[in-house]
């Protein structure tokens, strides 16, 4: 294992030379900064001054994975996420978030006022707390994950760090924490993995536009794996579930991408017919909304492994 504390970040996915080379199956540790580059440190801070768009969501990488070629499927396995600070930050900003008007979804309401919250860990590290104006406390469970994990996009495209897509990117799926694996198609030799946008907690949809944003020291490993020919959009796996992530606007298109992708994955692994897999998912899949404020919305369709495990073909495993 080796570690890097590289503090040079990128704000785009694609278009950069790799900063780190790793071997397949090699565990390595990287430092990732919060979406404000660690510059928003008090409730009196001004988010849009310290982190003006598009210099938000700083990313660590690109990371070149030796032996991975363009067209290969790369498995990015998150082993551990250790908070690099004992506090995280969250905001509400004018003209941003699900309940605000934007250029593409305008309304005639006055913009929300800007607010900043500093959330601190409880003594046992299991809960984050922040004071209210009247002296009470807001408390939420600590649930670490990376909002952004991706590879260089196809065809030489360069995307801002706030964008999600078939290359991964700013997915904001809360399941992308320790013990999870994200499968992506490498579009360049070495894949050029980027990671960042650490979250200490986030509800589905990231409705106000930020999670509890935090810095991490993250240990991960990457390797090339075999997948079926129907692989198209990011696939997810942990000990309990498999899922496919779709990104699009409107939201129903993101759902269609995710559901259709998972139907095809189940068909490949079980030899069920498309109709049978469609029926199975209809009765027990889950749709998790990752983000409703990004350039595209993100949704993961997942199913419990135990539902499909008895039917998995001998040559396959989840």
Image: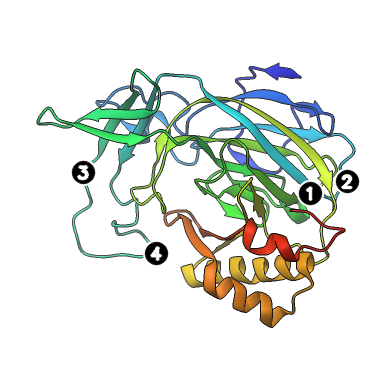
Q: Earlier in the sequence, mark 1 or mark 4?
A: 4
At which x and y percent is residue 91? 32, 38
Query: Is disc 4 placed on a helix, strand or loop?
Result: loop
At which x and y percent is residue 58? 55, 33
Residue 17 appears in the rendering: no
Residue 112 appears in the rendering: yes
Name the residue carrying label 4.
Answer: 104
Tag 2 near tag 1, CB within 8 Å: yes
Name the residue carrying label 3.
Answer: 113
At which x and y percent is residue 245? 60, 58
Name the residue carrying label 1.
Answer: 186
Q: Which mark is residue 69?
A: 2
Mark 1 surroundings within 10 Å by alpha-carbon count, few (fewer than 14), some (14 through 19), many (20 or more): many
Mark 3 surroundings within 10 Å by alpha-carbon count, few (fewer than 14), some (14 through 19), many (20 or more): few
Mark 4 surroundings within 10 Å by alpha-carbon count, few (fewer than 14), some (14 through 19), many (20 or more): few
At which x and y percent is residue 183? 71, 50
Mark 2 surroundings within 10 Å by alpha-carbon count, few (fewer than 14), some (14 through 19), many (20 or more): some
Q: Earlier in the sequence, mark 3 or mark 1?
A: 3
In this view, the residue in front, 116 or 265, is 265
The image quarter containing residue 49 is top left
Picture residue at 45% right of the left edge, 36% below the top: 143
Q: Mark 2 to mark 4: distance in Å?
A: 38 Å
Q: Earlier in the sequence, mark 4 or mark 3?
A: 4
Query: Is disc 1 placed on a helix, strand or loop?
Result: loop
Query: Is disc 2 placed on a helix, strand or loop?
Result: loop
Q: Mark 3 to mark 1: distance in Å?
A: 42 Å
Q: How many marks?
A: 4
Query: Is disc 3 placed on a helix, strand or loop?
Result: loop
């Amino acid at each position: 294992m080796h570690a890097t504390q590289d503090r040079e970040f990128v704000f785009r996915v694609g278009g950069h030379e790799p900063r780190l080379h790793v071997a397949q199956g090699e565990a390595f540790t990287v430092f990732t900064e919060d979406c404000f580059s660690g510059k928003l440190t008090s409730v009196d801070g001004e988010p849009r001054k310290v982190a003006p768009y598009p210099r938000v969501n700083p990313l660590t990488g690109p990371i070149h994975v030796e032996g991975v070629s363009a067209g290969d499927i790369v498995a990015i396995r998150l082993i551990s996420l250790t908070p690099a600070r004992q506090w995280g930050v969250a905001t509400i900003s004018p003209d941003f978030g699900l309940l605000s008007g934007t250029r593409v979804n305008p309304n005639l309401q006055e913009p929300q006022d800007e607010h900043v919250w500093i959330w601190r860990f409880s003594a046992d590290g299991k809960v984050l707390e922040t004071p209210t104006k009247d002296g009470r406390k807001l408390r939420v469970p600590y649930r670490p994950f990376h909002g952004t994990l991706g590879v260089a996009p196809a065809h030489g495209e360069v995307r801002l760090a706030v964008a999600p897509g078939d290359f991964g990117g700013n997915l904001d799926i809360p399941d992308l924490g320790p013990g999870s694996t994200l499968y992506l198609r490498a579009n360049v030799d070495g894949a050029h993995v980027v990671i960042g946008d650490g979250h200490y907690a986030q509800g589905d949809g990231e409705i106000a536009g930020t999670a509890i944003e935090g810095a991490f020291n993250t240990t991960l490993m990457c390797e090339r794996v075999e997948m079926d020919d129907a692989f198209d959009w990011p696939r997810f796996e942990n000990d309990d579930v498999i899922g496919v992530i779709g990104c699009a606007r409107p939201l129903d298109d993101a759902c269609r991408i995710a559901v259709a992708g998972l139907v095809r994955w189940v068909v490949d692994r079980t030899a069920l017919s498309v109709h049978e897999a469609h029926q199975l998912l209809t009765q027990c899949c889950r749709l998790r909304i990752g983000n409703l404020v990004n350039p595209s919305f993100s949704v993961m369709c997942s199913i419990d492994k135990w539902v499909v495990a008895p039917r998995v073909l001998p040559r396959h495993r989840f």
